[in-house]
Image (cartoon, rainbow, N blue to C red):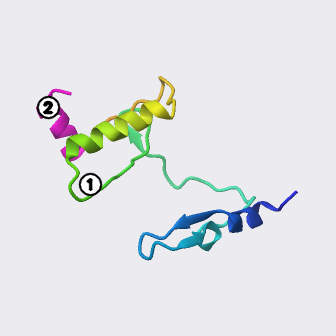
């Protein structure tokens, strides 16, 4: 069996700056050492995470929010996972009646 750390040398991602394939081990390290949370974000009383995005050139906000909602459906998110938009995306949905 391979050591987990060496598996990271076999996975490549494209650099957004150069387009070249870069081993994942360049910026990810494997450890068996447990970590502790410094804080847990909440929205109301529920633990939460924040996912941010920027619009690609020529892509409208409505297209982006639709693509994100479609991806949520495609990955098979459980019914207990609740996603919503904040900021401009939330305001857009309110105006668009979504």
Name the secondary structure under disc 2: helix
- Tell me residue 82's x, y (percent): 41, 30
Find out whether the residues at labels 2 and 1 contact each other: C-beta distance under 8 Å.
no
Name the secondary structure under disc 1: loop
In the displayed structure, 79 sits above or below 89; it is above
Mark-to-mark CA distance, 2 and 1: 18 Å
In the displayed structure, 76 sits above or below 36; it is above
In the displayed structure, 22 sits above or below 55; it is below
Horizontal arrangement in the rendering, residue 73 relative to residue 33 (left or right): left
Q: Main secondary structure of the magenta part?
A: helix
Is residue 3 or residue 45 the one in the foreground?
Answer: 3
- Tell me residue 67's x, y (percent): 34, 40
| Quadrant of residue 24 within the rendered picture | bottom right
- Tell me residue 15's x, y (percent): 48, 70
Q: Identify the mark nearer the N-term, 2 or 1.
A: 1
Is residue 97 or residue 90 the one in the foreground?
Answer: 97
Picture residue at 21% right of the left edge, 40% below the top: 62
Q: Is residue 22 magenta?
A: no
- Range of magenta residues: 85-98
Picture residue at 84% right of the left edge, 60% below the top: 2
- How many marks can you see? 2
Q: In which quadrant is the C terminus drawn? A: top left
The label number, if any, that marks residue 55 in the structure image = 1
Q: In which quadrant is the N terminus drawn? A: bottom right
Name the residue tied to disc 2.
96
The crowding category of the residue bearing disc 1, from other C-alpha atoms within 10 Å (few below 14, some 14 to 19, many at least 20), is: few
Horizontal arrangement in the rendering, residue 34 relative to residue 2 (left or right): left
Picture residue at 56% right of the left edge, 52% below the top: 37
């Amino acid at each position: 069996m391979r050591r987990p750390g060496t598996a990271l040398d076999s996975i490549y991602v494209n650099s957004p700056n150069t387009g070249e394939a870069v081993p994942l081990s360049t910026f990810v390290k494997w450890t068996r050492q447990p970590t502790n949370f410094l804080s847990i974000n909440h929205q109301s009383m529920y633990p939460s995470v924040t996912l941010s995005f920027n619009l690609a050139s020529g892509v409208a906000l409505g297209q982006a929010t639709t693509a994100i909602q479609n991806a949520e459906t495609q990955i098979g998110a459980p019914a207990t996972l609740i996603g919503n938009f904040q900021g401009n995306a939330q305001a857009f949905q309110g105006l668009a009646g979504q």
